[in-house]
Structure formats: structure tokens, C-alpha cells
Amino acid sequence: MMQKKCPQCKNLISITAPTCLFCGRPNKFVTNNYVKKKWDKEYKKDRFSNFKIQISQKIYLLFIIIGILIILLISLYK
């Protein structure tokens, strides 16, 4: 098993361990990969929800424009 020294307490810890068993310091390599995976999932969710918001805003804008056009057409033919 691969081991490395903890930079804080200098004890040997496993590379795959999330934290040092002796001092509790987070293992940089494991934590970094976890954050990247977690952020990527949240980014995809946020991107999808942002897409839905943009579509709904465009639909509202379309209805407003159609409403204004109908009002203008009615006022022109009176």
C-alpha cells in the first residue's frame, strides 16, 4: 500500500485515506478529487435548472409581445 507523510504531524498515512488518522488533517489528493466530482454534479444540475429558467423567461416575453401586438391591432381597427 502506498503511503506518504502527513505535512502537519509527519506520520505515515495511506494515500487513499481521506484524513490523517493522527491529527485529522484532510488528505489533499482525496479531498481534491471529491470536490471536483461533487462540483461537477452540482454544476450539471445548476446548468439544467438555469436552462429551464431561460426557457420560461423567453416564453413569458413571447406572451407579452403577442399581447401587446393584439392590443395594438385592436386599437388600429377601431
Image (cartoon, grey):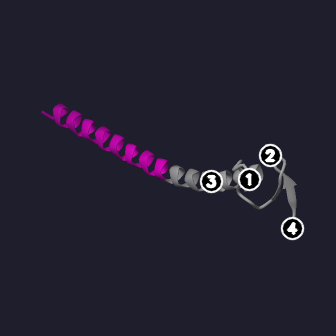
Give the mark nearest the N terminus, 2 or 1. 2
Q: Quadrant of residue 44?
A: bottom right
- Is disc 3 placed on a helix, strand or loop? helix
Q: Are marks 2 and 1 in contact (CB under 8 Å)?
A: yes
The stretch of residues the image draws in magenta is 49-78
Q: Main secondary structure of the magenta part?
A: helix
Measured in 3D between alpha carbons, the distance from the residue under mark 2 to the one under mark 4, in whole angstroms, is 20 Å
Q: Residue at x 87, y 63 (%)?
A: 2
Please tell me whether residue 31 is drawn above or below residue 68 in the rendered image. Answer: below
Nearest to the observer: residue 10 or residue 66:
10
| Up/down of 75 relative to 49, above or below | above
Cα–Cα gap, marks 1 and 3: 31 Å
On the image, the x and y values in percent for residue 52 come to: 44, 51
**What residue occupies the far left of the structure in this picture?**
78
* Disc 4: which residue: 1
Separation of residues labelled 3 and 2 (CA atoms): 32 Å
Numbered disc total: 4
Local secondary structure at mark 2: loop
> Which percent across, then down, holds residue 78?
12, 33
The nearer-to-camera label among 1 and 3 is 1
- Dot 1 or dot 4: first in sequence order is 4
Task: Please give the residue where the numbered disc 3 appears in the rendered image.
Answer: 40
